[in-house]
Image (cartoon, rainbow, N blue to C red):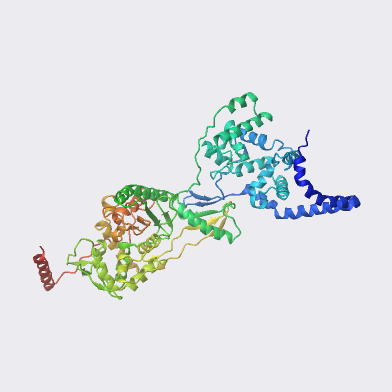
Amino acid sequence: MPNPLSPVWARIGAPLRRWVTPALVAVRRHPLRAVAVLSGGLLVYLLALAAWLPSTADLRKVRSEVPSAVVSADGVVLAEFKRINRQWVPLDSVAKPVVQALIATEDHRFYSHHGIDLWRTLAAVVHTLSGDRQGGSTITQQLARNLYPDEIGRSVSLHRKAKEALTALKIEAVYSKDEILEIYLNTVPFLYNAFGIEMAARTYFDKPSSRLNVLESATLIGMLKGASYYNPVQNPQRAKARRNVVLGQMVKHGHLTADRAEALSKQALKLNFERQDTLQGLAPHVAQWVRAWLIEWADARNLNIYSDGLVVRTTLHAKMQKAATQAVVRQMAALQPLADRQRRRSQDKVPLQAGFMAMDPRSGRVLAWVGSRDFATEQFDHVGQARRQPGSTFKPFVYGAAFEMGRLPGDELVDDVVAIPLPGGGVWRPTDGKAPPSGLPMTLYDGLSLSKNTITAQLMMQVGPPRVAQLARALGVRDSALDEVPSLALGTSSVTLREMVTAYAAIANEGRHTAPVLVLQVEDRRGQVLQRFAEPIPEPAMYPIQALELVNVLRGAVDEGTASAVRTRYGIDADVAGKTGTTQNNTDGWFILMHPQLVAGARVGFNDSALAMGDGWGPGARSALPIVAEVFQQSLRQRWIDPQARFAIDRSRPAPPQPTLPEALRGLGDFFGRWLKSP
């Protein structure tokens, strides 16, 4: 009978003899010295190797890892920061057939060895030398390899096996056998971003691991030999064959009768496959911002956001956040068909996007933040990152600057054709769309509440762009550059929604600017406060009386102006004030609404600023207002804010100055002159 080792020896014999022969000669001459040298060298090698492998403290962290959490002000978990998509379950919550199949197939002497199965290792060496490569790793060795792939590696070498064996011995010294099984089952990968038996059970069979039956358990354990090769979704025949091998091993080691295994092996794979994507939570864009901030905060304190169980308490109001998300989704669903119909002849469908933010003007606490219509398809934040022209929502800064100069809401300007020379040459001629100027005097109150471009442009030239830009910055537009040119009055400089809501909150807070606050404190896993963040002190940005005058004028925009749908359609009768905004060609629609306890704003538009929305649905009063109004409606109904709260200024509509007799006659003459010229 031929020796099965002959081919192997033929390949390695010659080079091995070149190294081994001198060593054997040395051993024969000085056996004790040679043994001592070899033993000492091996000991030094193992000690040096152990120093580079995970320490006992590192091993203990594995089981105690707790992801950090982001929590709303009312105690709802908004997000968890996990290293991988895993849900840890205790061993006694895992179905018994899973454990039986694992031990029977991967390591049937698991409870009798101390991390290394010498018999299995020797058998694996013999089989490998004979040309039938086999693995000899125990469950503990596999766990070592899974937990520390970078430190141990995957190469086929004695060096790697030594690292794996040493780490396994360390693991056995730290944990009990059941703890090792629990850690193994919770960390092993199963494809499709599923780590651990719980996520695998939910991914492949849509059930918790506690309810897995024998066939399902055998299928998952069978994947451990090669998750891709035995993938039951892509390779069902291979997966079934491997499953049946696992059933045979369960019979061999007394966990299953032969008759039952034979009956089960004839059954087809019955998958209920569904990817288990990481949960986005109520406020994914906020979680994204908090994660970036927390990593830096934790690194400075030698903490790990994925394992140290930090708790970040935010200012978000979970119920309002949910209402805001629903409002954005609902409005986008209503507008998208209109957008698709408008663009069907020219290009493919382009999704509309929106951002929403709400804050308490008194404290600066952010209550709701929706960065896009769907975080899964749009991670870009349309609250804090997107910079777009704000249109007419910028106009209050012009009127606010004028009020601070002594102008009054009852002062008048003539609604007439405007031609403003520009410093670099040319003329700026702002109009109000298709509506011709009336040629009549108009109060500043009506100019803002009715959003008249001609009145606003004239007022801008009286106040001056630098003064308007200065007030806008003081109120909250501090991160975006403002071009100090006449057209700034109509919102031609790009800003973020976050800046605009912050500025309106300062107006609602009687001219006191408060920076938006999102994080209140950070706690450890035991609830001990690691750092509490003081709320910012409000800064004077505008004189209180002028700020309140501006609020009163913006009440008019809601009562009788461009935002009247707040009253007529949504039935909001609380003391609110606000402003719509629409940029040129309906590129962006804006709306911001103020209440003494809540300021909220929304912007709607395409990602590409070159794309326009339709005339019938693109203006801010139709695109953005419904989102804000719906959230306000819910906030008032649910008493998240007080419906009886009032701004500290009486509601009034200023009476225009009474014209003198010559002025009245001149106005009458102008009227008849235009009438005679009309066709």
* Residue at x-position 55% and y-position 60%: 297
* Residue at x-position 70% and y-position 55%: 52
Answer above or below: position of 540 versus 49: below
Answer above or below: position of 380 versus 270: below
Q: Nearer the viewer, residue 442 or 136?
A: 136
The image quadrant of residue 112 is top right
Is any part of residue 153 visible from this angle? Answer: yes
Residue 448 in picture, x, y percent from top left: 26, 64
The image quadrant of residue 357 is bottom left
The image quadrant of residue 111 is top right
Number of numbered discs on residues: 0
Answer above or below: position of 243 versus 170: above
In the image, is 558 to the left or to the right of 135?
A: left
Residue 645 in picture, x, y percent from top left: 34, 56
Q: Nearer the viewer, residue 666 or 185?
A: 185
Residue 164 in picture, x, y percent from top left: 70, 47
Residue 268 in picture, x, y percent from top left: 54, 29
